[in-house]
């Protein structure tokens, strides 16, 4: 956990990195870290003002189920499956009464479909038994449901109930560590440390923005440093491609270069 002055840079940056970054001091106070983090968020928000939950849903139940299904697969893949699933099982009671083999065939494209089927049916049963078939709007109640951890609970609270929450998925954690906002890998500790840096009202959008950045620019294996809006204040600048033209080719989704017709 970050306490007191700490090193903002965990390894010696390249010469190119030093020339771009304006974070030159080897030590950074907690106040300086907070200011740099909030500046970074503003820059990323300017890049992704449209950031949002990329799972399709219309109700809290649909978002809860979709988030559970998103484990070990993409949101795009989940969005292809959930319309069929929710037409067949529109309520928690319908999920609870599902025949496992029939649900498995629907969920097969998402991977780990047998385990996910058990989770979804168990979720439906718990909602019917303990909450009248409705999704609760409290963190402490959500995390008691089968297959629901803090990440899933915060997704649901922030996007279906308007309750601010920080969603520490693999993208959020990676980007937060690269930006030097935390050194931690435990999602709960990351949530606590980042939550202490930013106002509660920003938590949900902050989650969307960092996840968007991780999916589109700050990739796990080859980040597009040369096309990154926070390059000048990022301690990890230089870990990826720094040439702007080459980095631009690494951008994904709506930021990806348009192919010539």
Image (cartoon, rainbow, N blue to C red):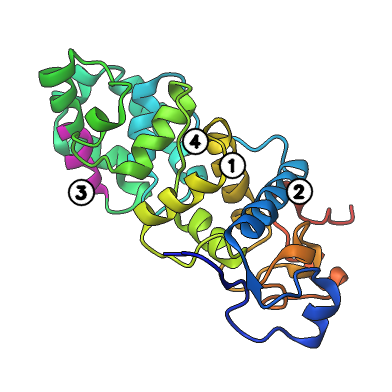
Residue 137 image point, x, y percent:
33, 21
Q: Is residue 251 above or below residue 92?
A: below
The disc label shown at residue 198, or none: none
Residue shown at the point (75%, 86%) measured from the top left? 14
The residue labelled by disc 4 is 55
In the image, residue 247 sits, relative to residue 175, either above or below, namely: below
Q: Does 207 sit left or right of 32 as displayed?
A: left
* Residue found 34% across the figure and 29% down from its top: 85
How far is mark 1 from mark 4, CA to CA?
17 Å
Quick one: SS at disc 1? Answer: helix
Q: Is residue 69 visible?
A: no
Mark 1 or 4 closer to N-term?
Answer: 4
Of marks 4 and 2, which one's residue comes earlier in the chain? Answer: 2
Label 4, label 2: how far apart the Cα atoms are: 24 Å
Does 223 appear above or below 51? below
* Nearer to me, 5 or 209: 5
Residue at image location 67% in from the left, 78% down from the top: 26
What residue is pinned by disc 2? 43
Instruction: From the image, state whether disc 4 or disc 3 is nearer to you.
Output: 4
Q: Give the range drawn in magenta.
A: 113-122
Q: Which mark is residue 115?
A: 3
Residue 15 located within the stretch drawn in magenta: no
Graded by Cα atoms within 10 Å as few (under 14), some (14 to 19) or many (20 or more), the crowding at tag 4 reads: some
Task: Estimate the x, y position of residue 32 in percent, counting from the top left.
Answer: 66, 59
Query: Can residue 118 be found in the magenta stretch?
Result: yes
Q: Which of 250 and 30 is in front in this view?
A: 30
The residue indicated by pointer 1 is 206
Q: Do the residues labelled 4 and 2 touch (CB within 8 Å)?
A: no
On the image, which quarter does residue 131 sit in? top left
Q: In the rendered image, which quarter is residue 126 located in? A: top left
């Amino acid at each position: 956990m970050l306490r007191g002055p700490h090193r903002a840079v965990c390894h010696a940056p390249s010469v190119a990195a030093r020339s771009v970054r304006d974070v030159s001091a080897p030590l950074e106070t907690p106040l300086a870290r907070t200011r740099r983090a909030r500046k970074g968020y503003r820059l990323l928000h300017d890049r992704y003002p449209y950031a949002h939950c990329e799972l399709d849903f219309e109700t809290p139940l649909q978002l809860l189920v979709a988030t559970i299904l998103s484990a070990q697969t993409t949101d795009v893949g989940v969005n292809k499956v959930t319309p069929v699933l929710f037409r067949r099982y529109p309520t928690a009671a319908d999920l609870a009464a599902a025949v496992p083999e029939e649900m498995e065939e629907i969920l097969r494209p998402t991977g780990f479909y047998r385990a996910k089927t058990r989770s979804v049916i168990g979720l439906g049963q718990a909602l019917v038994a303990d909450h009248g078939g409705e999704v609760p709007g409290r963190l402490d109640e959500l995390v008691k449901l089968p297959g629901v951890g803090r990440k899933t609970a915060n997704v649901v609270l922030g996007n279906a109930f308007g309750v601010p929450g920080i969603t520490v998925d693999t993208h959020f954690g990676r980007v937060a560590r690269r930006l030097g906002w935390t050194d931690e890998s435990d999602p709960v500790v990351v949530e606590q440390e980042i939550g202490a840096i930013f106002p509660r009202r920003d938590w949900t959008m902050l989650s969307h923005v960092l996840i968007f950045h991780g999916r589109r620019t700050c990739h796990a294996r080859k980040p597009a440093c040369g096309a990154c809006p926070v390059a000048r204040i990022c301690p990890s600048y230089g870990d990826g491609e720094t040439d702007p033209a080459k980095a631009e080719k690494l951008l994904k989704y709506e930021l990806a270069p348009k192919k010539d017709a």
